[in-house]
Amino acid sequence: MPMSISPPVTMSATLAADEAIARRRQAGEQVIPMTSGEIGLPVLPVLREKLAAAAHLNSYGPVAGSTRLRTAVAGYWRRRGLETWPDQVVCGPGSKPLLFGLLLAVGGDVVVPVPSWVSYAAQARLVGARPIPVPVLPGQGGVPDPVRLRRAVTAARAADRDPRAVVVTLPDNPTGDVAQPDTVRRLCAVARDLDLVIVSDEIYRDLVLAPATRAESPALHAPERTVVTTGLTKNLALGGWRLGVARLPDSELGRSLGERLTGVASQIWSSASAPAQEAAAYAFDEPPEVTEYIAACRRLHGEVARAVADLFAAAGALVAPVRATCYLYPDFEPHRTLLERAYGVRTGAALAELLVARHGVGLLPASAFGEPAGSLRVRAATSRLYGDTDEERHAALTADDPCRLPWVRESLDRVAEALTDLTSETAPHDR
Amino acid sequence: MPMSISPPVTMSATLAADEAIARRRQAGEQVIPMTSGEIGLPVLPVLREKLAAAAHLNSYGPVAGSTRLRTAVAGYWRRRGLETWPDQVVCGPGSKPLLFGLLLAVGGDVVVPVPSWVSYAAQARLVGARPIPVPVLPGQGGVPDPVRLRRAVTAARAADRDPRAVVVTLPDNPTGDVAQPDTVRRLCAVARDLDLVIVSDEIYRDLVLAPATRAESPALHAPERTVVTTGLTKNLALGGWRLGVARLPDSELGRSLGERLTGVASQIWSSASAPAQEAAAYAFDEPPEVTEYIAACRRLHGEVARAVADLFAAAGALVAPVRATCYLYPDFEPHRTLLERAYGVRTGAALAELLVARHGVGLLPASAFGEPAGSLRVRAATSRLYGDTDEERHAALTADDPCRLPWVRESLDRVAEALTDLTSETAPHDR
C-alpha cells in the first residue's frame, strides 16, 4: 500500500471539531458550539445583493484578482495607515490558501508563535517545511517573544535549518490578545536583523473590541519585509464565500514574493470566485452600511465574549480581559488537582472531551494550538452563540442587550451550569 | 535575500498567456485568443438564479462539501456507469486544487503524460515531487503509453525514486484526443501491477464531440485505485465560480486517500464557495435545461473547432480529426524548412511568438505541455471565438450555423489569413 509510508495529514482541528459537533447536534444532542471561530451572523443584505448581481461573472479573470477588487483593497489598507498600490494586492479563495501560497513562495522553514492558529504549522508540514515554535509572552499573544525569536532562529541556522519567515497574528487567535506596539516593533527589528519575512495575519484587524486597544501592523515598522493578509471571513461573517487578500511589501522583496505567490496561485487555484470578488470589492470600499454592520458585529462580539469570560472567571479559571476577536483562552490550571482527582483529567484534550461529552460544551484544547498536552487551557470561540436561525442572529445583532435574548441567555446559562458543575468541590466521584 | 535560493515558480502557461493577450487587447491590439481553454459562453440563466438565491449561505460547511452537492455528484457519476456513494465525493474550489491536494495525499512522485496540461508537472514540483514524463502514442493523448509506463516506473524505482501515481486526461488537453478503451484498459493493468494510484482528470468528459467516440474511465477497469476529477468549468463554462469535485475509489485505498485529501483541504482551503456548491448541486442533478445547454455548447464547440481545424489543414499543418474538447494540436513540422528560412523559427515558442506578434493569433507552443522545445506543434483553443459580448455568445450558442455569424466568421477569416500568410511560399524575406 503506497499510503503507508506517507506522513500523516492532520485535519484542521477547528474544522474537525466543528464537524463533530454538527454530527452530535444532528443526532439530537444539545451542544454549545464554541470550537470554531466561524461567525454565526447573517450576510449583510447589500452584499447578498452584490453577489447575486454578479452571478453572471464566469471568467477566471486575472490570477491576482480583478483590478476593481485590488483597487478597493488598496484603499482599505490606505485608510489604515498603509500606503498601498493595487499591484501590491493578491486575492485568493480565502486567506488560508494565501498563507499556504506564501509559505511556498518564501520557501524554507517558518517560525510560528506558540500558541497559534491550528493551520500555520500544519501548512508548513504539508510542504515539507518545519515549523519552528517560539513562545509568546503573557498578553502578547500572536507575536513570538523577540528575544526567543532571535535565539531560535540563530540556533536553527547553526543546525543547518533554513528559517526564512515568521508568522504573527494581530489581533490573535487563540488568545484574543492584541500584542503591544512595542512588542511588534521589537519583533520587526529582530526580523530585519535576521532577514526574515514577516507574515502578518490580520484577519481580526477590524475586531478590536476595547476602545483603548490598538493593533499596530508590523508593516508600519518593517514595511520592506511584511506581508499582511486579511479577508471577509471574520469582520463580515463571510467564511463560506472564500475570499482573502494579501498585501505584499512595496519593495524588491515584495515584488519577487508577489510574482512567486501569483505563480503558485496560478498552479493551485487559478483565481478566487469572480462573483465573490465583485461583492468583496464593494465591501472593501467600506461604504457606511458596511462599516455600520461591522460596528454592530463588534459590539455584539464584545458583549457576548465578555459575558462568557465572566463565567470562566466565576468558575475559577484564569482569563484575560477581552480585547479583540471572539476568542477566550481560559486556563483551568487552578483546578488541576480537582480535575485530576474528580475526573482523571490531566490534559487539555481530556478536559475538552469531558466538557463536550458530559456537559455539551464544545471547546478546543490548547494542544490544538501547539501548546503542551498538559496545559489545561482551552479556547472558547463565542461567535456562534447568537442563535440558530437568521432571525435570531439578526435580532442579536440589533439588540441593545443581546445577552438578555432568551436563546443567548440559555446558552450562557448552560455554559455557567457546566462550568459550575465541572469545578464544584462536590465532583462526581464524591457523590 | 532569502528568495535567491528558492526554486523558480512557473506561472501557469495558459493563465500567463491569457493575461498577456488581455493586455494586448487593452492596448488596442486585435488578438484572436486561442491560448486558454476558458469557455467563452454566458452562464445558463437558471444557474445564475440558483447562485443568486444562495447568496445568503455564508457558512464554511463540511470540508468535503455539502451533503446535497455530494449526493448530486454521486448521481452524476452513477448515470455514467460508475456506482458512487456521496461519501466518495470531495468537493473543492476547482478541480485544480483537488488535483494538487491529491498529489499531497498520495505522496511520492507522479507519472504525467507527454504532452499534458500545464499544471500537473508544475504542481508536482511545487510540493517537491518529481514528475516522471511518459509519452503518449499517436491518437491516445492523455494516456501514457502502457509499455513505456511500466518501463519508466520500473527504472525510477530502481533509481530509488518513489512513483505512486499516474495522471491521465480523458478526453485530453492539449491534444483533443480521446484515448481508446483498449489503451485505457492496458494502462489500468500496468497501474495495478505496479500498485499506482490512477488520477483520471475527466473535466472534458461531457465534451466528446464525435458521436462514435467513447471516453471510458479507468475507474471502470481499476475501480479500487482510480480517482476521477471533474468540475463545472468546461461543460458549463463556469471557470470563474471555482467548483470542482473528486470521486474517490470505494476501497480501503479510496477511504485512506479520501481522509488524507480532506485533511489537506482543511489546511489549505477549508471548503468551496457555499453559494457555488448550492448552484453546482442543481447542475449535477442534470435537469433537462442543464443537459440541453451542455448539448448546445457541445454542438457549438464542434462546429467551430472543426472549422478551425480545416484552416490548419488547409495551411498544410498536420491536424487530427476533431473528437472532443475545444482543443486542436496542429503540427507545423511539414513547414519546418520554410519557417526556419523565412522567419528563423526553430521552436514552437518562436512560432507562437511570431503568430501573436505578427498575425495577432494567440496560441500555446507544445513546450508548454512538456514537449521538446523543437516541436512545431501548437495548441489552439477555440472556445473563445464565440463573441466578445454575452449577446454575441448567446447568439452563437443558438445559431444553426455559428460559423456564419459575422464575428465568428471574422475570427475564422483572420486565422485563415494569418496561416496563409505564415505558410505561403512568398514568405517575408523573399518580398
Image (cartoon, coloured by chain):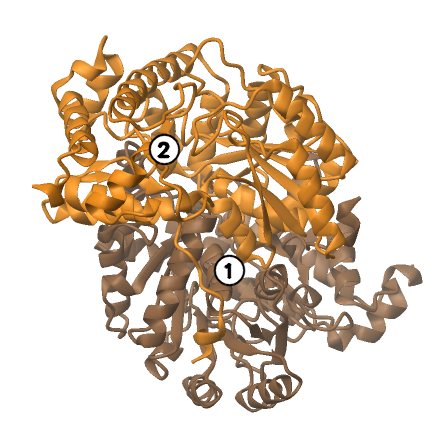
Chain colours: A orange, B brown
Image position of B259 with respect to A265: above or below: below
Residue at 31%, 39% in the rendered image? A336
**Foreground: disc 1 or disc 2:** 2
Q: Quadrant of the N terminus of chain A?
A: bottom left
B407 vs A286, nearest the viewer: A286
Residue A332 point in image, percent of width and height: 32, 34
Residue A28 point in image, percent of width and height: 9, 45
Q: CA distance from mark 1 to mark 2?
A: 39 Å
Residue extending furthest toward the left: A431
Residue B128 point in image, percent of width and height: 63, 64
Image position of A220 with respect to B191: above or below: above
Residue under label 1: B100
Q: Chain of mark 2?
A: A
Q: Quadrant of the C terminus of chain A?
A: top left
Q: Secondary structure at mark 2?
A: loop
Q: Is residue B167 left or right of residue A329?
A: right
Q: Amino acid at mark 2?
A: Asp
Disc marking residue B218? none
Residue at 79%, 50% in the rendered image? B4
**Label 2 packing within 10 angstroms: few (<14), some (14-19), many (20+):** many
Q: Amino acid at mark 1?
A: Phe
Q: Chain of mark 1?
A: B
Residue under label 2: A331
Is residue A269 visible in the rendered structure shown here?
A: no
Q: Secondary structure at mark 1?
A: helix
Is residue B66 visible in the rendered structure shown here?
A: yes
